[in-house]
Image: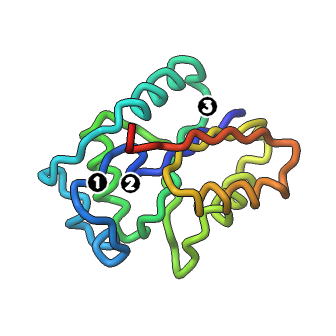
């Protein structure tokens, strides 16, 4: 089994506002009327990967809090995305590497993870967590908004 992890903010969409934890933790920050701009490279990767591996597991790995999940799911559906599950912040743990461990403990037949992310700190935490799973191949696709 292959797992495909997608960050949301500045990976699937370019945020139409300044990124602050306080605002990102609000449902209003996911209002479709805010005119989120799709990042085309990520969109193309998502569609190509869905065609290539329809049996793969497509997940959101975002540092949005669980309380905004319904708003996030709704916005992603409007943008044409569909994910099997959403790994969001529960409690105070904002470390994406810890959530990747939970994913791999749940899906222990995973052979590879492909991870789309824009922030080095999250890439580093996932890379560090993957050291505990040497049998799982990791590929990181870093989103670059400057291109």
- Secondary structure under tag 3 reads loop
Q: Earlier in the sequence, mark 1 or mark 2?
A: 2
Residue located 24% across and 40% down the image: 78
Q: Position of residue 46 (x, y in %)?
A: 47, 30
Q: CA distance from mark 2 to mark 3?
A: 22 Å
The outermost residue toward the front is 146
Which one is closest to the eye, mark 1 or mark 3?
1
Q: Check the image and report above or below for 102 versus 21.
A: above
Which sits in the foreground, 70 or 29?
Answer: 29
Which sits in the foreground, 108 or 40?
Answer: 40
Disc 3 crowd, CA 10 A, few/some/many (<14, 14-19, 20+): some
The outermost residue toward the left is 33
- Secondary structure under tag 1 reads loop
Residue located 55% across and 72% down the image: 94
Q: Position of residue 30 (x, y in %)?
A: 25, 58
- Specify the quadrant of the image occupied by residue 124: bottom right
Disc 1 crowd, CA 10 A, few/some/many (<14, 14-19, 20+): some
Q: Position of residue 102 (x, y in %)?
A: 69, 60
Query: What residue is shown with label 2?
Result: 9
Query: What residue is shown with label 1?
Result: 15
């Amino acid at each position: 089994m292959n797992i495909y992890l997608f960050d949301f903010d500045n990976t699937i969409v370019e945020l139409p506002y300044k990124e602050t934890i306080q605002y990102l933790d609000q449902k209003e920050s996911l209002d479709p009327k805010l005119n989120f701009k799709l990042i085309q490279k990520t969109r193309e990767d998502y569609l190509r990967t869905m065609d290539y591996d329809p049996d793969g597991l497509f997940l959101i790995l975002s540092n949005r809090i669980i309380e905004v999940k319904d708003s996030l799911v709704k916005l992603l559906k409007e943008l044409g995305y569909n994910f099997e599950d959403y790994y969001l912040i529960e409690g105070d743990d904002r470390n994406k590497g810890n959530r990747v461990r939970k994913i791999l403990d749940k899906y222990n037949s995973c052979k590879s993870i492909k991870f789309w992310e824009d922030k080095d700190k999250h890439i580093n935490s996932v890379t560090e967590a993957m050291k505990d799973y040497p049998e799982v191949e990791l590929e990181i696709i870093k989103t670059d908004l400057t291109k």
